[in-house]
Amino acid sequence: MAGDFAGQPYLDQLRPDRGWTVRVALFTAYSADPFAIGATLLAMTGRNGDAGSGNAADFAEAVERMRDKFKVIVQRGRLHRRSGLPKVTGVLDQFIVEQNYDEDWQSWHPKLALVGYEGPAGERSWRFWIGSRNLTPSRDLDLGLLIDGEVRRKKGSGPIPGISSIGERLAGLAQLADFPANAFADELGALTWRAPDDVRINSVALRIKGDSGASPLPGGTFDRIVAISPFLCPAFVKTMAEWGDKGTERILLTTVPAVRGLSGDAKALLKPMRLLALAPPEPEPEEIELDAGAGTSPPAGQNPNDDAEAEPPPISLHAKLFAFRTKSAVKVVMGSANATDRAWGGRNAEATVDFDAGPSIVAGIEAMLGSAMPIPAEIFSEPDISSVKDGGEFLDGVRRALVAHWPVSIDRTGQQFVLTATSPPKLGKHGIRLEASLITGQLAPWPVSGTTVDLGDIPLAWQTDLIQLRLSLGDDSCGWMQRVTVEPPIEAGRDRAAIARFLGIRSFYAWMRGLLDGDLGAPDGEPWDRHERGGNGRDSDEVRLDDLTLEDILTAWARDKAAFQRADARFETYITAILAHDDTLSAEDRNALKILQKIWAAARLTLMSPA
């Protein structure tokens, strides 16, 4: 929901402390949403409000500060398409790194955050988060663990096996010029890490394409095993059925649809377990992630879509956890991996943490179990669910095939953009319609036998390499966004052109005033994703010269010369961009900006000239 991000508590744990800044921030997720990416960007600059958003000026400053420092690594084809976002969303393309795992058999699925900070005296620290939450506005029940890293060793801190390897892999994927993978790993390896009370970390791991499979099962014998997973598959149910012995209590917290989706033989293996559920509503069609069981191809006669792993709707179970109790300890494995063979068999990319849990963690697990309802025994006698697909499921299969096997790019000639594919789209069924455009434009039909769609002339401010696509069949539809290659690349001034047209004069003045005031707090205003400038694109109120005056400039210089210099760098860049790219300016507004530009230039010349 615009202006209200359900992941705010998660981001509050990662935003920099007062006086600190973020040097680098790498996030991973299976799926992401433009609003959630914007909320994360704002949090990394300390400019997210109580609802998880900020205004237009906050968004502009966040883009400037985090350029070349922030990346979100996400499964290709899992950028959620949303309606109603402002065109400035196109600038988010630079922060997105897609992983093209073929979702018919595997997915990029880890949920991680690795953030480096710098303090006012140049000191450095890190925070590492691992869990089950995607970068979406979902209100699902998720789990996560936050770990603090510092150079100086403190009581209770120490090294964590695996964290340097994770950092090196993420930095290698992010390709940030100032943060090469080997240097990233070296810095992380030199830190000591402190976990929350009642958590003793044994290791963390990020398994990616090409790595061997793993198992959450530790060595030893256990008197109690708890598995929490919203998704199941027959192969892994068989694996879990072999854990423990006759004296082991086994508890599975899952969802009713996950159990109903199993074969009769797999359901029978669950009978000795205590089955609990937090029942979700039906999943959205565009949020389906498949799990085809063991191996790289389905067994003979088995539909590869039988074991459906779906991103559940809000207010539902999305946490993944395995807990094993011995006489002396409780060992926990938590992270992104579901109770599926796809997650543990070496196909998905997954991130997990292995730790020994104390009483408060155990109490939290018990609270989750206590909030669930028993799954009725009647579920075992229900007939197997038919493998016949409805329209939405069929469209999602076509979407997965297009994302993985249908390359699309953009040929650019000046401002003219043409979407180009290597072949016509394989839509798989007569009557399916495909539409595509830049996310800053209107969807246009893709010719059934065609390989190009002419998008026309696109002003620099609305140019982006993020495209949106939509499949339709009858009343069903499936939409998503993805990045494409643009040749030749978009010109370097795109961000400033886009933000200049987006802000309007009033938000520009608010931004400059905030910087002159020392950036102590975000000015009031509507959330960036709902920022409106009036029906014709102009600010709704007239702008007066006294909205930003010479007195403001001189006062800022006297109070904090560094704050003035930061504001000055933004001012000259963006007032020039607004005058060049905002064709909605009235003659009066344009004249007011030019007068302010002269006043500011005179102040700069006087204040910053050598004595």
Image (spheres, rainbow, N blue to C red):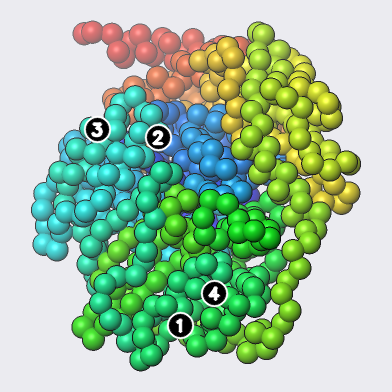
Tell me: residue 215, above or below residue 39. Answer: below
Q: Residue at x 69, y 22 (%)?
A: 422
Please tell me the numbered disc located at residue 173: 2
Q: Position of residue 486 (x, y in %)?
A: 59, 19
Q: Amino acid at mark 4?
A: Thr
Q: Amino acid at mark 1?
A: Ile
- Which comes before the other along the chain, label 4 or label 2? 2
Q: Residue at x 40, y 19 (%)?
A: 569
Q: Residue at x 62, y 63 (%)?
A: 307
- Which comes before the other along the chain, label 3 or label 4? 3
Residues at circles 3 and 1 in contact by the CB criterion of under 8 Å: no
Q: Secondary structure at mark 3?
A: helix
Residue linked to disc 3 = 182
Tell me: residue 417, above or below residue 142. Answer: above
Q: Gap in Å between the C-alphas at discs 4 and 2?
A: 33 Å
Q: Secondary structure at mark 1?
A: strand
Q: Secondary structure at mark 2?
A: helix
Residues at circles 1 and 2 in contact by the CB criterion of under 8 Å: no
